[in-house]
Image (cartoon, rainbow, N blue to C red):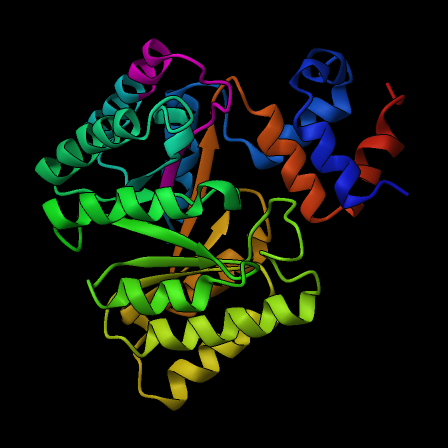
């Protein structure tokens, strides 16, 4: 059996991308989770999502940024995204990863680059979500977000927290005091048990605790999950506490549980879909397989069919 750890290991071996894409079923599978390799392909997919009652969040995929010059290109790409959102009228905001903006090179560089994108988004009346990555950069990501939030408004910039990290409930309490707009998700990185809950039961319990904290805060947050149990818990808690459908939004990944996305939108809930695109899609795609290893069997079963 292909384990989650093995798939996460393969996600770091981007050299396998060229080999894997020789197989048509593998390439077909990637289009389920990745909206394309350039902005225009992603715009077309977001337009379709909008027509189905969903909003979106653009995410440019690139985990191979190793120089200051490459980080500047990432900034230019996000400025192009914000411009295209305005030009096309699609309903979308943007998500950024600080590692793409130079976090591993110099946190100050990452802050400056992120600030340039947030500043442009704020000028356009749009919103930037600072994604959370592996636990080794959790604190510095929060620190940079706090600097941005001190300079910009509540509806200009937000952050992500992950329920599999033991620290997350405390982080949520602290960030809500600013206040901050938060997306809560479960988390997709392979983490040691001293920093992350190893058991799904504990991850889920922490998710529900944080969800209740967010919904009760009066600030607009994102409840990011594909788990029907977590969705039902959220709906139940909101209903029982008089929290309206317009007071928060559900968020899901492009290509994951499309049926559920459409159902929630039809039921009157705000539904945002995280839409990744870019040439460097391989690590992201492999992490999606790792989240649900049964997906790999689709690829393997069809690998050698014509």
Residue 249 sits above or below residue 209 on the image: above
Taking depth in this image into account, of 6 and 104 the one nearest to the observer is: 104
Q: Is residue 277 above or below residue 4?
A: above
Q: Which residue shows up at 47% across the image and 62% down it?
A: 167
Q: Residue at x 25, y 26 (%)?
A: 113
Residue range highlighted in magenta = 56-74
Out of 298 and 222, give the one closest to the viewer: 222
From this viewpoint, which residue is outermost toward the bottom? 240
Res 54 visible: yes
> Which of the image's four quarters has the C terminus?
top right
Quadrant of res 147: top left
Q: Position of residue 237 (x, y in %)?
A: 43, 83
Asked whether, in this view, residue 18 is left or right of residue 32, the answer is right
Name the residue at 39% across, 21% down: 105
- Residue 31 visible to the viewer: no
Q: Quadrant of residue 73?
A: top left
The residue positioned 66% from the left and 50% from the top of the image is 192
Percent from the top left, x then y, of residue 294?
Answer: 80, 47
Q: State whether residue 103 is above or below residue 3.
A: above
Which percent across, then down, holds residue 22?
75, 12
Query: How many numbered discs sit on the rendered protein?
Result: 0
| Residue 141 sits above or below residue 208 on the image | above
Q: Quadrant of the N terminus?
A: top right
Report if residue 66 lies within the magenta region. Answer: yes
């Amino acid at each position: 059996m292909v384990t989650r750890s093995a798939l996460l290991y393969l996600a770091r071996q981007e050299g396998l991308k060229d080999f894997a894409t020789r197989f048509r079923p593998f390439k077909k599978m990637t289009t389920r989770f990745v909206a394309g390799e350039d902005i225009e392909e992603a715009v077309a997919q977001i337009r379709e999502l909008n027509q189905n009652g969903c909003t979106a969040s653009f995410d440019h995929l690139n985990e191979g940024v190793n120089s200051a010059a490459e980080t500047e290109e990432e900034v230019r790409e996000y400025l192009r995204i914000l411009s295209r959102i305005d030009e096309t009228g699609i309903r979308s905001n943007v998500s950024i990863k600080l590692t793409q903006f130079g976090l591993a090179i110099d946190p100050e560089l990452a802050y400056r680059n992120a600030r340039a994108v947030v500043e442009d988004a704020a000028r356009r009346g749009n919103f930037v979500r600072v994604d959370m990555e592996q636990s080794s950069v959790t604190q510095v990501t929060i620190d940079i977000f706090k600097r941005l939030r001190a300079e910009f408004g509540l509806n200009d910039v937000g952050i992500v927290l992950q329920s599999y990290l033991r620290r997350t409930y405390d982080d949520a309490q602290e960030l809500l005091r600013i206040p901050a707009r938060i997306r809560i998700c479960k988390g997709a990185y392979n983490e040691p048990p001293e920093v992350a809950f190893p058991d799904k039961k504990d991850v889920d319990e922490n998710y529900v605790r944080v969800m209740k904290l967010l919904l009760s805060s009066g600030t607009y947050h994102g409840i990011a999950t594909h788990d029907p149990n977590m969705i039902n818990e959220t709906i139940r808690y909101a209903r029982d506490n008089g929290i309206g459908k317009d007071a928060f939004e559900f968020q899901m990944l492009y290509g994951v549980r499309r049926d559920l996305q459409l159902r929630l939108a039809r039921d009157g809930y705000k539904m945002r879909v995280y839409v990744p695109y870019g040439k460097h899609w391989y690590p992201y795609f492999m992490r999606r397989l790792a989240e649900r290893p049964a997906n790999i069997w689709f690829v393997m079963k069809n690998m050698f069919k014509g």
